[in-house]
Amino acid sequence: MAGNNEKYEALLKDLRELEVYLHERGEKTHALSVKFAENAKKDSANRDFDLNQSRMLDYQHHVWHASSARLNRP
């Protein structure tokens, strides 16, 4: 059986991995947000849809990053 210190170290490792994952998800959603915003400028037929998608993804980007930052606090 793992001792308390080993369990604590394993938990910290998992939290660091989660922090990295959340940050990467934030970066991916931000990149998609930018693509939708750019497409909204080019395609007037789908402009409303693209702008809404861009806003939603930008919001998700901020949520992912806020969650990641929260894990990084001492």
Image (cartoon, helix red, strand yellow):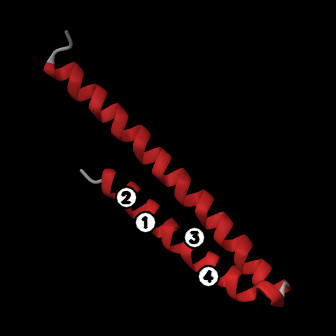
**Would you call the spot at circle 1 few (<14 residues within 10 Å), some (14-19), or many (20 or more)?**
some
Please give left or right for residue 7 compared with residue 13 in the image.
Answer: left
**Residue that mark 2 sits on:** 67
The image's mark for residue 52 is: 4
| Residue beneath the point at 57% across and 79% down | 55
Q: Nearer the viewer, residue 31 or 46?
A: 46
Please give left or right for residue 19 compared with residue 3 in the image.
Answer: right
**Residue that mark 3 sits on:** 57
Where's residue 36, x and y in %? 71, 75
What is the spatial separation of the Cα atoms under label 1 and label 4, in whole angstroms? Answer: 17 Å
- The type of residue carrying mark 1 is Val
Image height of 18 relative to 60, above or below:
above
Dot placed on the residue nearer the N-terminal end, 4 or 2: 4
Camera-nearest label, 4 or 2:
4
Dot placed on the residue nearer the N-terminal end, 1 or 4: 4
Camera-nearest label, 2 or 3:
3
- The type of residue carrying mark 2 is Ser
Dot placed on the residue nearer the N-terminal end, 4 or 3: 4
Where's residue 12, x and y in %? 29, 34
**Would you call the spot at circle 4 few (<14 residues within 10 Å), some (14-19), or many (20 or more)?**
some
Please give left or right for residue 71 compared with residue 37 in the image.
Answer: left
What is the spatial separation of the Cα atoms under label 2 and label 3, in whole angstroms? Answer: 15 Å
Query: From this viewpoint, which residue is outermost toward the right?
Result: 42
The image quarter containing residue 42 is bottom right
| Residue beneath the point at 46% across and 51% down | 22
Where's residue 14, x and y in %? 36, 34
Badge 1 vs badge 2, beta-carbon distance below 8 Å:
yes
Describe the element under mark 2 as helix, strand or loop: helix
**Residue that mark 1 sits on:** 63
Where's residue 51, x and y in %? 66, 84
